[in-house]
Amino acid sequence: MGNGGKKIRLSFNSPVILGFTLACFIVLILDKVTGSASTRAFFSVYRSSLASPFTYIRFFGHVLGHASWDHFFGNIMMLLVVGPLLEEKYGSANILFVILATALVTGVINFIFFPHVQLLGASGVVFAFILLASLTSIEEEKIPLGHRETQEEYRRLYRRDYAKQYFDMVCVDPLGNLIRPNYISEHFPKMLKKNGLPRIRFHDLRYFCASLLVSLDMNMKVIQRYLGHNNMNTTMNIQNPHTNKKYIKAA
């Protein structure tokens, strides 16, 4: 109850994503309780008899199964970052269709071409969502492949000042000039100074992100995957108290 006897209503805009996350969690619990028997029976794809109805269940159910908690958290964290935005934009029915279609396509491909591989996990769904998000502008609902149209608009706006020699290039600024590789590193210190922020390198943002995850007790294996480190020792060096203090203080 709220002030004046008013009821407080809680609502969420991504029931499919949240439901999918909960289902993955329950399936992983069942996996631990049954010693992976449930995952083998329903939530992983491998070469089996087409006469068995369980084979067709596994074509869809494999996206709910995960081999470990690290596997689960690695996929679900990415899913919860991208999924709710897409569900709010495209609707629950369309997102459910993407999940089912991705499950079926990846399941059938694994069944046919990789008979000795046991496929499970939501990685395919996460990839499909990332691909969908990258192909569609959230604000303008335009596919970025229409970059040429944007260039045309700037060309008409700036007329003779537009650098027409780079018209076939993608990485150009509004005036048509090539964006130099060091543009960000040059302008980053100016942005920091303008906003009264401590002076750090642009690359330090990556290190700060890792340090912050460590301070939040994030699993080191997950952090290693985020940073793309081949060696866990490289990731473990982030726990150095001096580097942690430096970058967390800078924030």
Image (spheres, rainbow, N blue to C red):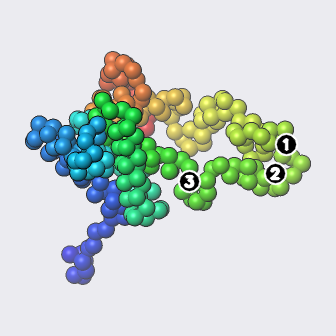
Say which amino acid is labelled 1.
Answer: Lys
Cβ atoms at labels 3 and 1 below 8 Å apart: no
Q: Residue at x 28, y 50 (%)?
A: 56
In the foreground, 154 or 148: 148
- Name the residue located 50 percent from the left edge and 50 percent from the top edge: 132
Question: Mark on residue 136?
Answer: 3
Relative to 107, is 198 on the left or the right? Answer: right
Report the residue marked by disc 1.
164
In this view, 139 is above or below 241: below
Q: Amino acid at mark 3?
A: Thr
Residue 224: % across, % down? 36, 28
Q: Residue at x 29, y 54 (%)?
A: 20
Total numbered labels: 3
Residue 68 seen anywhere in this rendered image of the structure: yes
Query: Dot 1 lies on which element?
Result: helix
Image vertical order of residue 179 relative to residue 134, above or below: above
List x then y, in percent, for residue 12.
Answer: 33, 64
Q: Say if 141 sits above or below 224 in the image.
A: below
Residues packed near mark 1 inside 10 Å, few (<14), some (14 to 19) or many (20 plus): some
The disc, 3 or 2, on the residue closer to the chain's N-terminal end is: 3
The span from disc 3 to disc 1 (Cα, nearest Å) is 27 Å
Gap in angstroms between the C-alphas marked 3 and 2: 23 Å
3 and 2 marks in contact (CB < 8 Å) = no
Q: Quadrant of the N terminus?
A: bottom left
Q: Nearer the viewer, residue 109 or 217?
A: 109
Q: Which residue is mark 2?
A: 155
For the residues labelled 2 and 1, say whether their Cβ atoms are less than 8 Å apart.
yes
Q: Earlier in the sequence, mark 2 or mark 1?
A: 2
Query: At 40% across and 53% down in the image, what residue appears?
Result: 101
| Mark 2, secondary structure of its residue | helix
Which of discs 3 and 2 lies nearer the camera? The answer is: 3
